[in-house]
Amino acid sequence: MNSIALSVEDLSFSYSGKKALDKVGFSINPGECTILLGPNGAGKSTLFALITRLYDTRSGRIELSGFDIKKQTRKALAMLGVVFQQTTLDMDLTVMQNLRYHTALHGMRRKVAKQRIQEELERFDMYERRFEKIRQLNGGHRRRVEIARALLHKPSLLLLDEPTVGLDVPSRKAIVEHVHQLVNDGQLSVLWATHLIDEIYPDDHLVVLHQGQVKANGAIPTVLQQTGKESIDEAFFALTQGART
Ligand SMILES: Nc1ncnc2c1ncn2[C@@H]1O[C@H](COP(=O)(O)OP(=O)(O)OP(=O)(O)O)[C@@H](O)[C@H]1O
């Protein structure tokens, strides 16, 4: 088994001739939380669409735990948990029903599914609310359910596309803490797309994406050293020539 959770090599993608990703390359080790930081239009969503196979990779290579997503798609995608920017929960179903649907899609046996659902909901302090409809939950609690759902099949990499957008400050803080706790708890790796610098923890790794290109990649002290800056804000500003986040 390959020890790299995600490997992206020489990845390019264009929309009708307009380049959105230009020879992007980086990798994530097990147990690493990598923040994909980029201003609007940097290419974050395009990268996620390629990793999740919403778009076909035409140039370059993506591997999840050593499985090529083009050639070994099923095995590769089994390693992946995803939380998209827009919620994909069914508002009129209960928490439990939403999660059961997901376990069925992954072919999990009922008994195993029941246990996994309980474990993940308890981890997110949501087990008591399992019979409530999603519509009755606030934004922060919906996000927790979505992240719990993404983890049911025990992926090795969790992709989060700006998961705190639209949440109030305490809910945002709770989600950021929960996800970092998940990484600390075990071998889960995370790729978290955001443009919010205050969501970054000191031990996180950074990939700074700007105009489709990786401008910096590494642990925070490395990125600060490479840019000669003292804070992530300053480094990000310098790397993106002051693009608004
Ligand atoms: N469906 C599309 N058709 C044409 N161009 C697109 C399409 N989606 C994105 N783009 C362009 O590709 C580039 C990268 O966009 P992308 O949405 O991947 O960036 P992003 O970093 O996710 O931005 P945001 O933070 O605003 O979501 C931008 O120039 C964008 O205008």
Image (tube, helix red, strand yellow):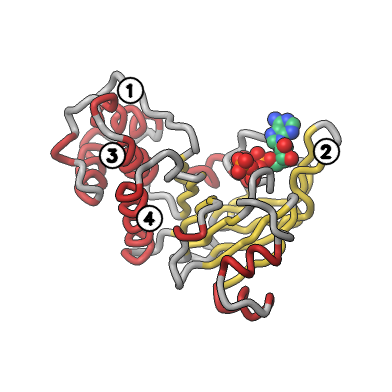
Mark 3–mark 2 Cα distance, whole angstroms, equals 38 Å
Mark 4–mark 2 Cα distance, whole angstroms, equals 34 Å
Mark 2–mark 1 Cα distance, whole angstroms, equals 37 Å
Sooner in the amino-acid sequence: mark 3 or mark 2: 2
Image point 51% across, 59% down: which residue? 197
Sooner in the amino-acid sequence: mark 4 or mark 1: 1
Mark 4–mark 1 Cα distance, whole angstroms, equals 23 Å
Where residue 90 sits in the image (x, y, percent)? Answer: 35, 23
Nearer-the-camera pick, 173 or 148: 173
Type of the residue with mark 3? His
Where residue 184 sits in the image (x, y, percent)? Answer: 35, 66
The reply to whether dot 4 and dot 3 touch (C-beta < 8 Å) is no
Sooner in the amino-acid sequence: mark 2 or mark 1: 2
Image point 33% across, 22% down: which residue? 91
The reply to whether dot 3 and dot 1 touch (C-beta < 8 Å) is no
Whether residue 104 is situated above or below residue 189 in the rendered picture: above
User: On residue 141, which mark appears?
Assistant: 3
Residue identifier under label 4: 176
Sooner in the amino-acid sequence: mark 4 or mark 2: 2
Residue 72: in sight, yes or no? Answer: no
Image point 47% across, 62% down: which residue? 200
Mark 3–mark 1 Cα distance, whole angstroms, equals 13 Å
- Disc 3 packing (10 Å; few <14; some 14–19; many ≥20): many
Type of the residue with mark 4? Val
- Residue at mark 2: C-beta within 8 A of ligand 1: yes
Residue identifier under label 2: 18
Sooner in the amino-acid sequence: mark 4 or mark 3: 3
Where residue 242 sits in the image (x, y, percent)? Answer: 70, 58
Residue 162 shown left or right of residue 124 in the figure:
right
Type of the residue with mark 1? Met
Residue 27 shown left or right of residue 180 in the figure:
right
